[in-house]
Image (tube, rainbow, N blue to C red):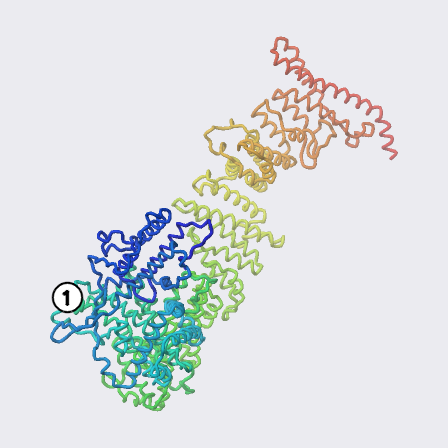
Amino acid sequence: DDMEMDDTPDVDIAQLEANIDRAGLLAILQPFGRSRPSALAVYRAMFRLGLLVNTQDIQLDEIHPASIVLAMRNWKKRDEFEASHPSFATSLVPREGSPLPSPHHHGGDHHAKRHSNKSYRVSDDEEEDIESNGGNENSYRLKWISLLSEIRHEELQLNDVLSISSLPLSPSSTINIMIRVGTVSMLSLDNSVESNLNNEYEKFMAALDELSLDLIVAAMDDPDCRQLLSALEALIYNAASKASPLVSSWSSNDLGNDLMVQICNLANLAMTKVDLTEHQLHLLSNISNLDMSFAEKWLQSPTSLSSSVSNHLAIMKTFVTMPNSVPDKEMPLCDADAQGSATALILSMVESTRLLSLSRLIVVSGMPQSVPTHLQNNALRSILYSTALSWAFKQSSSDDKSRTILDEYLSHEMTKEFYSSGVTSAMHLADMCIASSFSVLSNETSDSMLLPLVSPSHEPRIALRLLAPLVEYPNFALLGNDQKRKEVTAECLLAEAAVVAKHYDRDATTTSPKDLWSLASQFLSDSISLESLSTTNFNDIFECLKGNRGTWWCFEAEPHHEELLFQALTVILQIGDDDGDSSTPETEEEIQRLCTMQTVKSLFLPLALCSKGISVDQSFIDGNAWRNIPRMSMYNFVKTLMKVSNLIHRVDTVGRYLKLGSGEKSLPPCCAVVLEAVNDAITSITSALPPEMCRDMPELSSLYSVAFKTSVGGRLWNEALDACITNSGEKDKNDNLKYLILEMVRVGDIGKLVDMSLTVVGGSGDLFQLATTIVEEAALEQQDDLDSGVDYWGCLYTLHASRGNWKQAAEAMDICGKVTVSSALSTTNPLTRGASKKVMDRASLSAHACAHAVSLLDTSHQYIGEQRDTILTKEDIERRAVRASALRALSMDECSPNSISSILKSPSLDTIDILARMGYYEHAIAVAAGVSSKRRSNPSGVDVFFDSLRHILCTYLVPEAMACSAISDEDNQLESRSKLIQMQASSSVCEQAIACKSGPSTTSPVQATMAMNLLHQYTSAYSKRCGGLGLSVASAILDLNENVVLPIWLKDLCMFGSPANGSNLFARKNCDSSIADPSALVRLLMSHHLYGDSCDVVTAILSSQASSSSPSSRLPEKGSIDYVPYDLIDRLWQIIENIASSSATASEKTQKKIQLLLQSRTCMEKSLTKHFERLKLSEDGLRSARTLSNNA
């Protein structure tokens, strides 16, 4: 499939050709179902296709992947050239009978079968039927298929057996030499194998192997069968490499039926391709009548009793035991490395055995009647195991990724003294490896002599794949007696689950770690009988064994006492064997585990020490101490304790692979499996043993501790709380509760802690009081640890808030803020940027949380600190929150002081100044308001807030609004830097100003516009509270530049107030939100020599009288009094007159300015004239107005 090309025009041809090259190389280097082709076969195939241009210059050892790809590309280029130049066309393929080159280096067997350490499979593209594509001879893909087909053809020719002969190595030993076209193999073949088949069953099995070989050969030769065979091998390979039969429980879920259906289809099709004789049909019909033990022996044997099958598949007869030494005179047939030769031999033998197992499976599936279950399972076990073994040998070692599992195994074997370099040692290595590998399949290896490949401590991933078919389809002789194998498989599953858990995704279709844990737990529990052994009451036995000891569980044992205890328990367990107990016999390992239980030591070891001599025999049972106890009761008691021991061992095993601190997503489900095992053990103990004994059993307390730690590690908080409450030890219970609460706070699961706080804990009430006490203690303990990532104070606030205890919540936040600031000020080393930020964040958050909690209290109780020396009111807390926010904003600025202590210790006025200087006007004003509300006023009688606000606006904001850079030194970063962000955060008006700007613009005009908007906003908002603020701002603007024109909004604010009020003329007016003083504005303008503007102000004020109420209806006694500063207006008129009279010799420019000034005075004169006319009307109508007013 990797070679398929898309005909669309936009396809990258180079990339497609690279993909084809990769797929072709994979098909050569990593073929599935057989060994890698020899270099000689590739060399011959390339010569046949004319890819070797100069055979004299190319050697056999120069055939490598790069040279193959280069030859294929040259082939393609030559074809393209010949298509465009027909006169130069030459034949690339040699004619039949062309002599093959003789490479200088002939490849030996170990060189021909170099193995791969990759685990994935590439389909056999060279075996596809490509006749339909004959019209596309120039296709690059077809060129690769032609090469692969030719390689396959040459490999089959090189593997043809020419002869087998015997060669003596010494007077006492010989070896057999199998000579092929391309290789020479050394075989330990029994030439007299056929003559020894005296047993009818052996002859029957040999004949079945010959039939199996005929069927598999027919399937390989037929295209339709070959396609089914390829799909079947892929399915078997994937299942074996993933341990699918075990993980997916094929035998119990009937998932293996799909595989059997495909096998049956292949078998039936292959049967039609072979002309079966009457004898072969008779064999097929009688397979089901084969004895079960002989059927298992036939199906699981790695060799064949038929010499023809062995010769065709090149299957060796393996040694059963390793010879003690090498023959006296080893004949160095070739100067080959023993380990490399052994590797090639082993891979070839395993592949041949796999093919033999597959052929037997096809024969079994082709029976005319239904396949018996035991035959099907045995055949599946054999093919899955041999395939898994073939896969395992090619995997990388976990210790050294550059070596395969087989390399590592052979390297270890080569360290033994009876191995040396040479072919004979290689054969011994191969023989022993194959014999030991397949002895596991036939159960010839004892449980104590397991191979390293099936050891969970060495390569659990490999061991799981090898054990999967053995456990899922167990040997008939092992049914009910495969406890050790299941335990090993369980540990392999747990190791696999621990690896899968690191990268597991809940949405993935792969097996979850929880399923693997559950399967492992099930295997460990299969060997444990969970039903009660007897209804015997063990109270008398317990009292007898306990004696008069009060603390019976505290017996101290010496190391040399373990053997004595083992003998005593063995004697007691022998009672069941003598009385015909049908339960599973105890293994030595189980008894040794039982001896490690503290309860068993404390109960049985004192009596065992009282026995005569240093050993325990039958007289131990007949002692006086047990006179009144029935023998079977004592036996049942020990068996119950052994059951408990096995359950504890199950808990230890499944919990050993949990990484409780890893935080993996799949951890809680896996912890649930461990808890299930713990609960089984606890239930077994409490239901089968006397309550008095359970109360003091150390193992029970340990199980509760395991349940607690596992629950906490998996964040199963309810289960952890149950384990705490049910623990009988009061000290352990309190310690665990404290650990549980602190762990929930550490991981941030506060919501669950709030829900659990209603749980009743013993006689001490609910969990809330205990939780608040523990959390507060922990918070005080870590007050000096500024880098701690656990927010104990926040948790304490949440707990109190959940109960509506707002005063306690406010107290917690108040202490949090004080402790945080105190720790930051007391530290000797300067804090890092991150630590400083954390301090300011915590201080600000605690201040605002405290203010929020206090605001929720009743008005009469809005204070805290009655239990301390200082009482803080709601206003004090709100001021502190405002200051904390301002200091936090200041500390986050890149131009702020590096020392956080200087920020926290700075006086209020200094804080206001630096905030305003850095552009945080809103924070500066808020801090100033807080200081003003606390001090009310300063000693000089000036309001603190007005003084601070005037300083903020006039010193810092006015220069920014006027875009003036002359306020300070140009090198001052604070004044010269951009303050756009700070201004934008101060008011929404600034945001609108930014949105209105379009097109290219510099930062300075935008910033000046934003500053002017802020100045307008603040001046208008605080003019009422701070009388004269507008005049102060106007004065600051004029002080910067006398030629500047005051903003219209500022003039209107000073003249009319906000909202505008034209009554009383020049009198000081208190408006709704501001105070207007036109006279003061005129004086201010005159002091800055802005006489024209002063005239304009007088004109505007006097003109506003025309729009006010009718002069005749205004009464002085009702407040209708107008004030006009005539002396100030006269002085302004006189100053202008003096300027005009002295301007005779002035320049033309000055003359123009004087003319404008005179025009302004003229307008003022006209407005005065109208004003006087209105005054006359007022005098005439004054009496009538009073009369009307009195009559009304």
Q: Is residue 1095 left or right of residue 401?
A: right
The percent coordinates of residue 140 (x first, y second) are 38, 54
In the image, residue 51 above or below residue 1087: below
Which sits in the foreground, 703 or 487?
487
For disc 1, the neighbor class at 10 Å (few under 14, some 14 to 19, many from 20) is few
The total number of labels drawn is 1
Among the 4 quarters of the image, the one containing residue 1121: top right
Residue 329 image offset from top left, x and y in percent: 11, 70
Mark yes or no: residue 1123 visible: yes
Which image quadrant for residue 381?
Answer: bottom left
**Residue farthest front in this picture:** 87
Q: Position of residue 290 (x, y in %)?
A: 34, 85
Residue 539 position in % (x across, y down): 40, 85
Query: Please, is residue 655 above or below residue 792 in the view?
Result: below
The residue beneath circle 1 is 332
- The one nearer the camera, 81 or 787, is 81
Of residues 520 and 928, which is closer to you in this image? 520
Which quadrant holds the N terminus? bottom left
Q: Quadrant of the C terminus?
A: top right
Along the line of sight, the residue nearer the viewer: 600 or 988: 988
Residue type at mark 1 is Pro
Residue sitting at 61 percent across and 28 percent down? 1034
- Element assignment for label 1: loop
In the image, residue 795 sits, relative to residue 321, either above or below, namely above
State the residue at coordinates (87%, 30%). 1187
Q: Is residue 589 visible?
A: no
Whether residue 1071 is situated above or below residue 904 in the rendered picture: above
Residue furthest right as drawn: 1191
Q: Find the residue positioned furthest to the top.
A: 1145
